Image: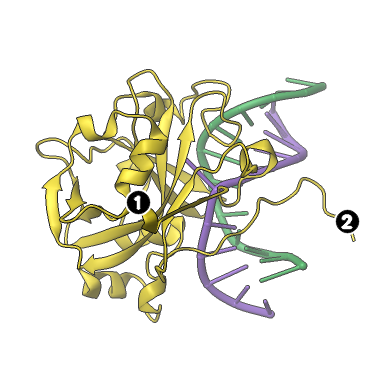
Chain colours: A yellow, B purple, C green
Amino acid sequence: MSGQGRRLTGGDLAGDPLTVARSLLGCHLVAGPVALRLTEVEAYWGVDDPGSHGYRGMTPRTEVMFGPAGRLYVYRSYGVHWCANIVCGAKGECAAVLLRAGEVVAGYGVVEQRRPGVRRRDLARGPGRLTRALGIVGEDDGAAVVGRGAPFVLRAPAEPVAAERIRTGPRVGVSGPGGDGERYPWRYWLADEPSVSPYRPGRPRVRRG
DNA sequence: GGAGCGATTATT
DNA sequence: ATAATCGCTCCC
């Protein structure tokens, strides 16, 4: 069982996103009545990361990624879905961890109302579904997940996640060099978790048949 | 000023 | 396999 541990602080998120990503696995993210146990995340690190929205510098959209650790970076995906990151690293550095999947551990009734008819394991399986389960929308861009009065709360697992249970691989859906699992094996997930989203390679630029 | 393109998901 | 759908980026 994964009970609730202590609240995470900004200091817990100030490290590099690879380290932070691993440490977020098994943590509970609380949004009002709903809580998810995080089972799958991805790291995006630096303006040299070709898979990152911060590639080649800051824009109005990605400004939050360059800010202090402990806030949400929320963006619209494919014009349809919201996806949420936890900003980490030092202020001025472009670093964030994308929340890809989780297991509902509280507020199941609320989530079920938000997603009628969806199988329990699929409720937060994938980044777009995860935000819907938590009720995260574009207005939450920049919202805090640490500190007093933060609208979201992160809690560490009561017992640390065993390192042997953590798997790594290429990031999902990232096309081009950023999707190269040799250079960027920056997806992290917990072994044997039904809520982990299926891997899909990034779509190639041209498709002919 | 506008075309092109996604860190995706639900449906065919 | 592919439509849905829109803000950001980059190129005229």
Which of these two is toward me, A194 or C11?
Answer: A194
Mark closer to the chain start, 2 or 1? 1
Side of A53 where A110 appears, left or right: left
Q: Position of residue A166 (x, y in %)?
A: 40, 54
Pick out the residue farthest to the top: A92
Which of these two is toward me, A116 or A145?
Answer: A145
Tell me which residue sits at (50%, 24%) in the image: A59
The image shows residue C7, relative to residue A202, as above or below, that is above
Identify which amino acid the numbered label 1 is placed on.
Ala
The image shows residue A116, relative to residue A146, as above or below, that is below
Pick out the residue farthest to the front: A164
Quote the CA–CA distance across marks 2 and 1: 42 Å
Identify which amino acid the numbered label 2 is placed on.
Arg
From the image, tell me which residue sits under label 2. Answer: A208
| SS class, disc 1 | helix
Which of these two is toward me, A16 or A132?
Answer: A16
Q: How many C-alpha atoms fall within 10 Å of the one at disc 1: few (<14), some, or many (≥20)?
A: few
Q: How many C-alpha atoms fall within 10 Å of the one at disc 2: few (<14), some, or many (≥20)?
A: few
Residues at badges 2 and 1 in contact (C-beta under 8 Å)?
no
| SS class, disc 2 | loop
Q: Position of residue A118 (x, y in %)?
A: 40, 78
From the image, tell me which residue sits under label 1. Answer: A163
